[in-house]
Structure formats: structure tokens, C-alpha cells
């Protein structure tokens, strides 16, 4: 790099370049598996801190007189050559993570969303979040209505009962930062999408009250290329729920078969291939029905409170907390339609989330028990796994062959992949005293076979964070009071 004049960062950049060269010259023989992983983790933390410093320089460029569009153009042109989209994302990320903004109580702050994600910016500067987490948060923030993200929400201290008012942007920042600390960017993105869907004011009854919704539905057959055809279908929310549930129910893997030589034959199809086969099978089954008028509609599993169902039946305008297994939150209008017309399999819960009237069995896991497990575990118990409950299997603790019982508090949900990992002794699962599941991986150093190294026990926080996300969205949308746990830690 050639500086045109004396610059205070010339020497730090030179030292940084020399340090990177030293890292690149490191020899693999000087590392063990553990030390190599620690080195990668330390470098990634420094990389996140470098991203925070880069965003600071982007802000410096703006303070020097460059407009946002000019800065994006500069980053996208030579000698920087960033993709145009990434350059724009960098400029926006630098704006919303600006730590110099002092909120004076005015809704919207001094410059719109500038400084709205200060907590996340601090986490990036500390190496506790990645640049991808920032992009996820910026995208989510842009999709939340301005009146909500720049409004206020009251929180109640559960101990003292004190009620305080906070900026909604602060709560969003705290929530997105918490997700970044617990999850990879992909999972954080799913939670961010859940948040947007929960608080989007157009989500409520949009299927039924949007005059253009019906006209946007359609199905298009693409050209036949290499023996394959792509079909594009545009459906409203209610139709999407019904179709998705029907396909999910019909796309279960084939049972494992045992050959004469003892070899296990498993379903070789991927989830995408099974869905395609299920879609065709459902169409063929429906076309062959002797009396389509009395054919059973799709079974839809809905998790809702008694109040949600009552509001939907009475057609009240209320924010529902109902969710459809494998789909996500649904509007009150959609819930009302499902209660009225679909074959509804509902799991009713109390306002505190406790499962009501689901019984237990001492033999095989019943359908009722699987629904109860879906509400309790929220999905696969493996750390970081986001597999939905309907795609998981009920695993016994201890294993069935070791005398395990099919009681509700002796089972846990695992997706097929992580269920096989447990049987292969790559994963351990146990129930905590509060009957929630936690798991840990068992790694093996290839140079020391037969010496498993257990990792720390981890509770998969995705289901709990998903519930917290929905609660935060409902609070922000209603502007009502909520628990203190929504505050930044």
C-alpha cells in the first residue's frame, strides 16, 4: 500500500500485514488438533474485530464528507472491487452500528436508524458476533415497520413490579445480539424471519383482506429440459399451510429393511426427493378418489392456547400466538379457517406454555405424546439443529434396548441424522432436572483412535429463542408490557 501523505494508520497496517504473513507461514506440524482449533477460533475472533474496525473506517469516510451512495460506489470500484450489493450492505451496517449516537429519548434518534444496533456492533467489536450476523440483523430491521421499530414498549420487573418504558429499537437490538451470541448466522436468520413475520402488521388477515391476494395466486409449468420440469406455484398463507402439511405427512422415509445378510437398507432419497414424490402421490391419490367431495383434507397440527382458538372462532381482531408445526406463526384469520375447515390436530397449552390433557403411555410413543414432545422440545435436541418436531423421532432415555420406557419424561426428540449420531456414539443426550434436554458431541482425535473427547453439555436454545422471538414480536406490535428478560443483558 502506498500512502499519498503521512497517515496515523500506516504503521499499524504495516504491523498487521506482517502479523498476517507470520500466521500464513505457520506449519501444520507445530499444531495438535486442539491447538489448531484454538488458533482458528482466535483468528476468527480477530477477524470479527477487524470487520468492526472496517465499519468504523466506512463511518469515517462518511464523516469526511462522502455521501452514502458515493461511499458505496467507492467501495465497489477499483481498487476495492467489492460487489455492489455488499458495498451497500457495508454502508448500512456502518450506519446502524454507529456507537457515537446518543439517544435523547426522541423516537427515531438523530438520524433515523443510525446507531439502532449499537449492542450488536459492540458484540462484533468484541469478536462475539460475525459480520454475517450484522447483515442478518440489518435485513430484519429494514423489514420491520418504521412505526414499530422507532416506537416504545413498556417492560415490567417481575420482582418489584416496576414499569419502565424502553425504545423498541433497543429491545430489537438486544434480541438480535442475543441470537448472534447463541446461534450461527443461518439459525439467527431463521429467528429474525420469525420475528418479522410475528410483528408485521400486514400479516394479520392479509390473506383474507388483501384485495389483490387472490389475483396473485397461480401455477406455471416450466419448459421440459433434460427430462425435468420446474413447477412454480404462488399460494396464499392458508393454502401454503395446507399443502406443506400434506406433503410433510406423505414424505416420511421408507421403513428400514433388513436383508438376509443382516445389512440395513435405508431410504436413499433426500428430503427434497421425498417431497417431490409425496407431491405427485397426493395428486394421484386425489385424482383416483371415487368421491372427492368427501375426501379428507390435510391434517394440520396447530399449537395454540385456548384463548387463541376462542378468538379465532369468534372472529375477534386479536394477535394470535398460534403456530403451525413446520410452518411458523399464523394469523388469527388463518387459524379460524383451519379450525373451521381443516382436520385440526390442536395441542392446547396454558398461557404459561404448559401442555394440557395429553396423557402418557408405557409402551410405544403415542401420537399424543409426540405432540407433547413437540411442544416441550420444539424440535431436535442436538446443539444448533433447527429440524422441526414433525421431522424428528422420539428417542428413549435410556435407549429402548437398554430398558428405556416410553414415558413422556423419558423421551426426547432427535432428527434422523442426530438420532443415528447418538447410536454411533458421536452424540450424548440427557434430560436436565427441569426435564429439558441437553446434548454434547463426542469427538475423536484421528491420531488417538479409541479415546473419545466429550465436549461441554449444551442445551439447544433454538426452540426457546423461537418462543422468545414470537413473544417479543407480539409485545412490540401491541406496544404493551412484557418481561424484563427482553432487556439487553
Image (cartoon, rainbow, N blue to C red):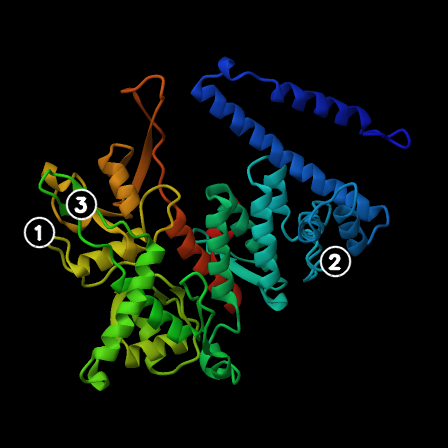
Question: Which residue lies under the disc numbered 2?
Answer: 111
Q: Secondary structure at mark 1?
A: loop
Q: Residue at x 76, y 27 (%)?
A: 13
Q: Residue at x 63, y 34 (%)?
A: 49
- Horizontal and vertical percent for residue 485? 47, 50
Q: Earlier in the sequence, mark 3 or mark 1?
A: 1
Q: Identify the disc placed on residue 410.
A: 3
Calculate the distance from the C-alpha at mark 2 to the C-alpha at mark 1. Answer: 62 Å
Q: Check disc 2: other Cα within 10 Å, few if <14, some if 14-19, many if 20+.
A: few
Please name whichever residue, 278 or 450, is drawn nearer the observer in this view of the structure: 278
Contact between marks 3 and 1 (CB within 8 A): the answer is: no
- Horizontal and vertical percent for residue 378? 32, 53
Q: Of discs 3 and 1, which sits in the foreground?
A: 1
| Lateral position of residue 8 relative to residue 262, left or right | right
Residue 161 visible from this viewpoint: yes
Please name whichever residue, 366 or 313, is drawn nearer the observer in this view of the structure: 366
Q: Earlier in the sequence, mark 2 or mark 1?
A: 2
Quadrant for the N terminus in the image: top right
Q: Does residue 77 sit above or below 233 in this rendering?
A: above
Please name whichever residue, 124 or 300, is drawn nearer the observer in this view of the structure: 300
Q: Identify the disc placed on residue 363.
A: 1
Instruction: Determine the residue located farthest toward the front in the rendered image.
Output: 226
Amino acid at each position: 500500500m502506498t500512502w499519498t501523505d503521512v497517515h496515523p494508520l500506516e504503521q499499524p497496517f504495516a504491523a498487521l500485514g506482517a502479523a498476517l504473513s507470520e500466521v500464513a507461514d505457520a506449519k501444520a506440524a507445530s499444531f495438535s488438533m486442539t491447538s489448531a482449533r484454538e488458533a482458528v477460533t482466535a483468528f476468527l475472533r480477530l477477524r470479527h474485530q477487524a470487520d468492526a474496525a472496517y465499519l468504523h473506517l466506512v463511518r469515517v469516510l462518511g464523516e469526511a464528507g462522502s455521501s452514502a451512495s458515493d461511499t458505496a460506489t467507492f467501495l465497489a470500484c477499483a481498487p476495492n472491487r467489492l460487489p455492489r450489493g455488499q458495498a451497500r450492505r457495508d454502508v448500512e451496517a456502518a450506519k446502524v452500528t454507529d456507537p457515537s449516537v446518543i439517544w435523547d429519548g426522541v423516537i427515531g434518534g438523530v438520524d433515523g436508524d443510525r446507531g439502532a444496533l449499537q449492542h450488536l456492533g459492540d458484540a462484533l467489536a468484541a469478536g462475539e458476533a460475525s459480520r454475517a450476523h450484522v447483515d442478518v440483523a440489518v435485513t430484519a430491521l429494514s423489514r420491520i415497520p418504521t412505526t414499530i421499530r422507532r416506537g416504545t414498549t413498556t417492560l415490567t420487573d417481575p420482582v418489584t413490579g416496576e414499569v419502565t418504558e424502553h425504545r423498541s429499537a433497543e429491545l430489537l437490538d438486544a434480541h438480535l445480539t442475543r441470537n448472534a451470541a447463541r446461534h450461527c448466522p443461518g439459525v439467527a436468520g431463521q429467528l429474525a424471519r420469525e420475528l418479522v413475520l410475528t410483528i408485521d402488521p400486514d400479516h394479520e388477515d392479509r390473506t383474507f383482506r388483501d384485495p389483490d391476494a387472490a389475483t396473485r395466486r397461480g401455477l406455471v409449468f416450466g419448459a421440459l429440459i433434460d427430462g425435468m420440469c420446474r413447477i412454480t406455484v404462488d399460494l396464499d398463507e392458508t393454502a401454503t399451510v395446507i399443502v406443506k402439511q400434506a406433503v410433510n405427512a406423505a414424505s416420511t422415509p421408507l421403513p428400514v429393511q433388513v436383508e438376509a445378510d443382516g445389512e440395513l437398507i435405508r431410504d436413499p432419497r433426500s428430503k427434497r426427493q421425498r417431497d417431490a414424490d409425496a407431491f405427485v402421490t397426493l395428486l394421484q391419490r386425489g385424482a383416483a378418489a371415487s368421491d372427492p367431495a368427501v375426501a379428507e383434507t390435510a391434517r394440520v397440527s396447530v399449537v395454540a392456547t385456548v384463548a387463541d382458538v376462542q378468538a379465532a372462532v369468534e372472529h375477534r381482531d386479536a394477535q394470535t400466538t398460534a403456530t403451525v408445526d413446520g410452518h411458523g406463526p399464523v394469523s388469527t384469520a388463518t387459524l379460524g379457517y383451519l379450525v373451521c375447515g381443516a382436520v385440526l390436530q390442536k395441542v392446547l397449552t396454558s398461557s404459561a406454555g404448559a401442555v394440557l390433557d395429553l396423557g402418557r403411555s408405557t409402551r410405544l410413543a403415542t401420537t399424543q405424546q409426540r405432540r407433547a414432545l413437540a411442544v416441550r422440545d420444539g424440535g431436535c435436541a442436538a446443539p444448533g439443529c433447527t429440524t422441526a418436531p414433525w421431522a424428528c423421532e422420539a428417542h428413549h432415555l435410556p435407549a429402548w434396548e437398554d430398558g428405556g420406557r416410553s414415558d413422556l419424561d423419558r423421551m426426547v426428540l432427535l432428527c434422523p441424522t442426530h438420532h443415528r449420531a447418538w447410536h454411533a456414539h458421536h452424540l450424548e443426550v440427557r434430560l436436565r432436572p427441569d426435564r429439558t434436554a441437553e446434548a454434547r458431541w463426542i469427538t475423536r482425535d484421528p491420531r488417538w483412535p479409541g479415546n473419545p473427547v466429550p465436549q461441554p453439555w449444551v442445551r439447544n436454545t433454538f426452540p426457546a429463542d423461537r418462543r422468545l422471538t414470537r413473544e417479543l414480536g407480539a409485545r412490540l406490535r401491541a406496544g404493551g408490557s412484557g418481561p424484563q428478560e427482553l432487556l439487553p443483558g
